[in-house]
Image (cartoon, grey):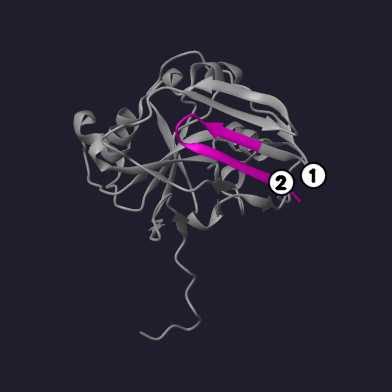
Amino acid sequence: MNYVFPPAAQVVVPVVGLAAVFPVRRVYCVGQNYSAHIAEMGGDTREPPFFFSKPADALVPGGGDVAYPPMTDNFHHEVELVVALGKGGANIPPGQALDCVFGYAIGFDLTRRDLQALAKEKKQPWEMGKGGDQGGPISALVPVAGGAHPAKGAIWLKVNGDLRQRGDLAQMTWSVAEVISRLSNYICLAPGDLIFTGTPAGVSKIVRGDVLEGGIDGVGELKIRLV
């Protein structure tokens, strides 16, 4: 096939213990999936999960230096469990949803909060707040081993060594299985899809020069520096 210019390279994420890499198709995110974060963002109910997307090329596999984005004065960190799908489908029952999971990673949903707030106010899409360049640093994927899926364990983030976010996966309002099932009611999921599953409380402003370190028990750690 001839192209008018060379196509973009396939976005991939490394996999712990494998030479093969995970090819990314789409990146979905769940909004406000921890009760304490819902409260700090002004909500107070267990409403059905809602979703938004990031472009696949916003991922920064392995972390490292991340460019501070333009058009913002209020850039925030959000540490999240990321689910990688090895199978897909539509209208997946919750009881079958975990069968679709290939593995897990830790991700940072970096957010231009001022742009997101303006979009909310005007009832406009969130893409410019959530989908910026390099807005999705992600660690290597840990494959599911022996059917074990992380349902509890610490999730945390430090900025320049100071603890900003700390929660537990057990505090998720909607479980991984519920999130996959609900999302599959809206759209047909496929192998290569990633789902950022929401963040605990403690999101805050970050600036150039800040070093972010985050981790999830049993999944791994991730480190970036804003430049």
Dot 2 falls on a residue whose secondary structure is strand
Residue 42 appears at what percent x and percent y? Answer: 58, 18
Q: Check residue 223 for magenta coloring.
A: yes
- Farthest residue to the front: give it: 17
Q: What's the residue at 48%, 31% (across, down)?
A: 198
Which element carries disc 1, helix, strand or loop?
loop
Q: Is residue 43 visible?
A: yes
Q: Residue at x 62, y 30 (%)?
A: 157
In the figure, 119 relative to 153: above or below?
A: below
Tell me where residue 209 appears, x and y as whole percent: 79, 44
| Magenta stretch: dominant secondary structure | strand
- Which quarter of the figure is the N terminus placed in? bottom left
Find disc 2 in the rendering and name its residue: 225
Can you say whether 201 is above or below 182 in the image? above
Is 162 colored magenta in this rendering?
A: no
Cα distance in 3D space between marks 1 and 2: 6 Å
In the visual, does 152 lie left or right of 122? left
Cβ–Cβ below 8 Å for labels 1 and 2?
yes
**Magenta residues (range):** 213-227
Is residue 109 in view from this perspective?
no
> Which residue, given by chain and number where applicable, does mark 1 sit on?
209
